[in-house]
Each structure stands twice: as structure tokens, then as C-alpha cells.
Image (tube, rainbow, N blue to C red):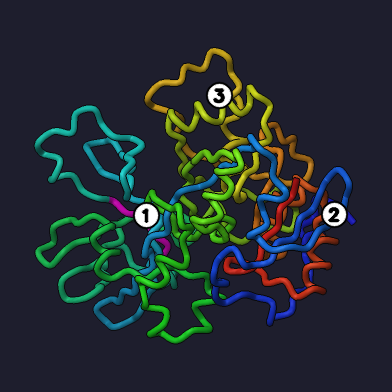
């Protein structure tokens, strides 16, 4: 079979192995360890992760945090729509400036003048059903707030603006704080009650890693869900270091691949940033030839996107760090230049995520490991068990 055919990465998964809720404590989930050198598999639990790491290894985590990005809206005739927040920007004359929802603002202007409040907050959102959306037709959240779609960009993605009762623009963060729901994956959301689904406080805690900090993701960087603060302390006491990157998980991570040939598919852009402090930590680990273990596929995509800058001797470690957008699509045949190990979940068949894992550890090796995991009853997907590849 053609290894560039998406069907190669398909497999059957029993429905009862799809995890609908996390394990508590988080690090009591199961861990399948695959050693690429010996081609052996070890069964253990995530709390024993430290046994498979070495002093001076560098774990690189994604500290982006999921926001309550799903909002239900309706038009004047009562037709209901689902709005999924993707990204926000400030419209300042002819400039679109992305606005970080948390402490970081990647494109912050040096001089935000006194008229900043008059700038319009433009939001990019996925609206469903998109075929029924009409441009310039108000989609009401309640009597005091609405979303106004202004432009259809592509495949159900619209650019628009949130407005309050007196038609003044409001930032997306305010709309989400008041009316947003945590965007749990559809396979979970459809199986739990509306009351449970709307428990924002619970899901913001359970659907985020303990170290998540920078608001902006619409899906969790799930490899990080297995860590506890106690485990992180244990790893630190053994000399295992941690560096942080931030990639706001968007459609580029979880959007299904539609084309049967791998090379015909593209990933959507996702924003990332690495602070100057963390650039320095990563550069030092590279120079000391320490193993770099990526916690999640999002971290892999960030690191492999910036390797030319990290490794460049002339790169000046300024206060700016590194930031930008990546649409890096990693598939079998990719030449990894940065990572030495990967912590990841068990992923959907025919997804860009399993393609990345297969690229790193081998197609047959990963699919055989998945078969063993299924036979042993491992839990799959966002709240499922974990895999370590070294």
C-alpha cells in the first residue's frame, strides 16, 4: 500500500476505549513506553515517567490554556448556531494586530495611543451551520450581546465582531467569560448532559494541564494533562529540567484531514511564542547535547519550526524571544532535527497527530503499538492514556 495514502493510518477502535473523563490523580493513567533503539514496549503508569528519563533531560511543555471558546447564538428568526472562537485581532486603520487573551501580546504596538478604545475587535470564528449564516445579520447571544459576521473567509470561518447592547465593540474575552462553554471534543460533548457540559469551572480545570498559563487554545494540549504538580517536583528533584513554549491550539491541530493523499492536505496556521528565557534554556540543552523530550505534538511542531533560529550561532537572545505562526505538517519521511523523545496521547485514526507520531517512531512500529494498546484496554483520545517514545 502507498505510504502516502491516508488510509494507511486507519485502524479500528472499540467505542468503549474512548475516554470520556480523565483519571484522578492525573498521573495514575497508564503509560506505554516505546524504545526506538531496542524496539521494545514497556507497560507502566505515568507516575513512573521519571524511571524512563535521565538527569539533564529537558522536557518542553506547551503552557497554552483552553478558553471557553464555544458560544451558542441565534438569529432573529430563532435559528441556532454554534460559534467557536478561533482568534482575535485589533483593527487599527489598515493594520490587524493579534491580541493575546492572556499575559502575552505577541504583536503589541510600541505606542498604543489614547484612542485605543475606539479600535474594533475583530474575531475569527467557526460558525455552524455555516451555510445558513448571513453576512451583517446579528447573531444574538442574549438581549445584551451579539455577534455580527462581516466576512466569510473559508470553510465556515467568519470574521466578525462582538457587540454589546448599545452596539459598541467588545473583546471576545468578555463574551467568552459571560457566555462561553469549554470546547470539549464532540465525542465527549455529545455524550454528557447539558448541565454537565455547562460546568465551566470543572472543565477549565480538567481540560487544562496543571501548568497551563497563557489563555488562547480551543483544544487542550492533551499530552500535558497527565502531569501533577507532585510529579513535576519529582522530576525536578532528579535534575530533569523544563522549558516552556506556547502554541495556541486551533484548527491546525485537530481539523480532520480530507484528502486521501497526504501531500494534498494542508494544516491551518497556529500562533506560537517562546520567551527569551526559554529560548536560552533550550539553546543550552542543545549545546550540552541533552535529550529534548517534547510533551505533545504541538511542542514538536513549534520546535521543528524554529530549529534554524535556535541552532544559529549568530542568533541574539533578545528580550523578544521567538514568535510567529506555523502550519508545519509533519508526516512520515520528515527529517527531525530537534526532538529526541515524545510524550503523547493515543490519537484519532487518519489524523495529522498520528501521522506525526508515525513519522517519529515508524509507521509499522506505531500501528503495532496501537494494536497492543487496544488489546490491553488502553484509553484513547484527549482524556485517555499516554505514550512515551524515546
Question: Would you call the spot at circle 1 few (<14 residues within 10 Å), some (14-19), or many (20 or more)?
Answer: many
Instruction: Please state which of the two labelled residues, at mark 1 or mark 3, is closer to the viewer.
Output: 3
Q: Earlier in the sequence, mark 2 or mark 1?
A: 1
Q: Which residues are magenta?
A: 122-126
Mark sitting on residue 309: 3
Residue shown at 57% from the left, 72% from the top: 23
Q: Which of the two residues, 296 or 264, is positioned nearer the viewer here?
A: 296
* Rendering coords of residue 356 (x, y %): 70, 49
372 versus 248 height, above or below: below
User: In the rendering, which numbered label is found on residue 365?
Assistant: 2
Q: Quadrant of residue 306?
A: top right
x and y, in percent, of residue 83 in the image: 38, 67
Give the image location of residue 117, x and y in percent: 13, 45
Q: Earlier in the sequence, mark 3 or mark 2?
A: 3
Q: Nearer the viewer, mark 2 or mark 1?
A: 2
The residue drawn where x is 33% and y is 45% is 100
Is 222 left, or right, of 104 in this rendering?
right
Mark 2 vs mark 1, CA separation in Å = 39 Å
Q: Main secondary structure of the magenta part?
A: strand
Asked if the residue at tag 1 contacts the one at tag 2, i.e. Cβ–Cβ closer than 8 Å, the answer is no
Residue at 44%, 55% (x, y): give it. Answer: 217
Q: Can residue 352 be seen by looking at this rendering? A: no
Question: Residue 47, labelled with which disc?
Answer: none
Task: Specify whether 296 is left or right of 218.
Answer: right
- In what element is the residue under mark 3? helix
Quadrant location of residue 7? bottom right
Amino acid at each position: 500500500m502507498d505510504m502516502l495514502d491516508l488510509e494507511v493510518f486507519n485502524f479500528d477502535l472499540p467505542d468503549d476505549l474512548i475516554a470520556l473523563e480523565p483519571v484522578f490523580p492525573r498521573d495514575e493513567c497508564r503509560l506505554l513506553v516505546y524504545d526506538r533503539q531496542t524496539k521494545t514496549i514497556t507497560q507502566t503508569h505515568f507516575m513512573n515517567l521519571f524511571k524512563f528519563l535521565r538527569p539533564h533531560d529537558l522536557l518542553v511543555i506547551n503552557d497554552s490554556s483552553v478558553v471557553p471558546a464555544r458560544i451558542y447564538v441565534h438569529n432573529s428568526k430563532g435559528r441556532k448556531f454554534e460559534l467557536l472562537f478561533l482568534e482575535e485581532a485589533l483593527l487599527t486603520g489598515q493594520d490587524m494586530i493579534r491580541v493575546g487573551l492572556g499575559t502575552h501580546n505577541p504583536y503589541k504596538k510600541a505606542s498604543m495611543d489614547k484612542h485605543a478604545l475606539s479600535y474594533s475587535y475583530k474575531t475569527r470564528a467557526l460558525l455552524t451551520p455555516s451555510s445558513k449564516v448571513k453576512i451583517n445579520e446579528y447573531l444574538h447571544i442574549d438581549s445584551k450581546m451579539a455577534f455580527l459576521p462581516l466576512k466569510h473567509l473559508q470553510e465556515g470561518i467568519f470574521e466578525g465582531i462582538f457587540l454589546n447592547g448599545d452596539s459598541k465593540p467588545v473583546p471576545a474575552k468578555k463574551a467568552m467569560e459571560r457566555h462561553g462553554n469549554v470546547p470539549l471534543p464532540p465525542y465527549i460533548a455529545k455524550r454528557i448532559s447539558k448541565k454537565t457540559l455547562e460546568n465551566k469551572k470543572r472543565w477549565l480545570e480538567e481540560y487544562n494541564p496543571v501548568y497551563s498559563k497563557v489563555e488562547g487554545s480551543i483544544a487542550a494540549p492533551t499530552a500535558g494533562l497527565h502531569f501533577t504538580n507532585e510529579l513535576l517536583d519529582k522530576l525536578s528533584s532528579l535534575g530533569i529540567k523544563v522549558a516552556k513554549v506556547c502554541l495556541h491550539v486551533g484548527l491546525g491541530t485537530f481539523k480532520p484531514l480530507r484528502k486521501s493523499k497526504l501531500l494534498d492536505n494542508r494544516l491551518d496556521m497556529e500562533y506560537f511564542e517562546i520567551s527569551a528565557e526559554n529560548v536560552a534554556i533550550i539553546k543550552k540543552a542543545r549545546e550540552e547535547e541533552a535529550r529534548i523530550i517534547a510533551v505533545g505534538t504541538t511542542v514538536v511542531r513549534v520546535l521543528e519550526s524554529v530549529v534554524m533560529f535556535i541552532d544559529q550561532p549568530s542568533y541574539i537572545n533578545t528580550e523578544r524571544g521567538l514568535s510567529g505562526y506555523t502550519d508545519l505538517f509533519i508526516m512520515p519521511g520528515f527529517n527531525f532535527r530537534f526532538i529526541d523523545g515524545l510524550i503523547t496521547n493515543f490519537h484519532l485514526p487518519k489524523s495529522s497527530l498520528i501521522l506525526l507520531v508515525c513519522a517519529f517512531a515508524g509507521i509499522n512500529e506505531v500501528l503495532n503499538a496501537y494494536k497492543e494498546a487496544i488489546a490491553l484496554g488502553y484509553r484513547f483520545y484527549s482524556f485517555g492514556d499516554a505514550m512515551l517514545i524515546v
